Image (spheres, rainbow, N blue to C red):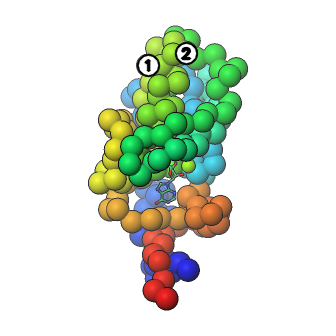
Amino acid sequence: MYRMSETPLITASQIENRLDSLAQEIKAYGPDIILSALTGSFMFSADLSRRLATPELQIKFIRASSYGNSTESCGKVKIEGIENLDIREKKILVIDDILDTGCTMQGIRCALESLGANEIRICVLLDKAERRIADIHADYVGFDIENKFVVGYGLDYADNFRTFPDIWTLSEENA
Ligand code: IMP
Ligand code: MG
C-alpha cells in the first residue's frame, strides 16, 4: 500500500507562481507549436499555454509510453499521435510532467528530429535529475525535486491522483 505525505511537496500556489516566471522564459523562445505529452502533462500544459497565448500558437497532443527494461537502460518508446504532425520549419516546445530516467523524452526527441523541426526545446514541470539514464536535459524546468515518487497536478499512481491541485509525495507503507 502507499501513503500520501501529510503536506504537499509543492502547493498549488507555488505552482501558480512558478508558471508565471516559466511562461516569461518560454516567451523569449517563442514556440510555434506546443507538443503536450499526455496524460501526465494535461494540467501543466493547460495552465502554461494560457500564459503563452498568442493567435498563432498551436497545441498538439501526443501519447508516449516507454517499455522494455527501463531500470537498466532505455527501452523503446511508443509514440501515438505523431503520424500526422506537420512540424517542418517550426519551433517546437515539448511539454511533459516529469523528467525521470529521461528515456521517454529521448524517444520523443528522436522521433521529432526526423520530422524536420526548426528547433526542439523541452519543458517539464518536474526534474528528478538523480534518476537520469538518458543523455537528455530540459530547457525549461518548473521544479527540481529529489528522488521521490510524486502524484497530483496531472501526475498519477496507477491512474489515480491526477486531479489533485497540489503535488504530493507517495511512499510505500510498511506492512
Ligand atoms: P522517464 O522515461 O523515466 O523519464 O519517465 C517519464 C514518465 O514516467 C513520466 O512522464 C511519468 O509518466 C512517469 N513518472 C516518472 N516519475 C514519476 C513520479 O514520481 N510520479 C508519477 N509519474 C512518474
Ligand atoms: Mg507520463
Circle 2 sits on which residue? 115
- Image side of residue 61 versus residue 17, left or right: right
Q: Nearer the viewer, residue 45 or 56?
A: 45
For the question of whether residue 98 can be seen, the reply is yes
Q: Quadrant of residue 88?
A: top right
For the question of whether residue 19 can be seen, the reply is no
| Picture mark count | 2
Q: Secondary structure at mark 2?
A: loop
Q: Quadrant of residue 53?
A: top right
On-image quarter of the N terminus: bottom right
The reply to whether discs 2 and 1 touch (Cβ–Cβ < 8 Å) is no
Circle 1 sits on which residue? 119
| Residue ranking furthest to the left | 130
The label on residue 77 is: none
| Residue ranking furthest to the bottom | 175
Residue 114 coordinates in the image, percent (x, y): 51, 16
Residue 102 coordinates in the image, percent (x, y): 41, 42
CA neighbours of label 2 inside 10 A, class few (<14), some (14 to 19), many (20+)? some
Q: Amino acid at mark 2?
A: Leu
- Image side of residue 74 versus residue 45, left or right: left
- What is the CA distance from the residue labelled 2 to the residue labelled 1? 11 Å
Identity of the residue drawn at 61% across and 67% down? 161
Identity of the residue drawn at 68% across and 30% down? 81
- Image side of residue 106 versus residue 163, left or right: left
Q: Nearer the viewer, residue 103 or 139?
A: 103
Q: Is residue 126 above or below residue 164?
A: above
Residue 168 coordinates in the image, percent (x, y): 48, 70
Q: Is residue 140 above or below residue 154?
A: above
Q: Amino acid at mark 1?
A: Glu
Q: Is residue 52 above or below residue 171?
A: above
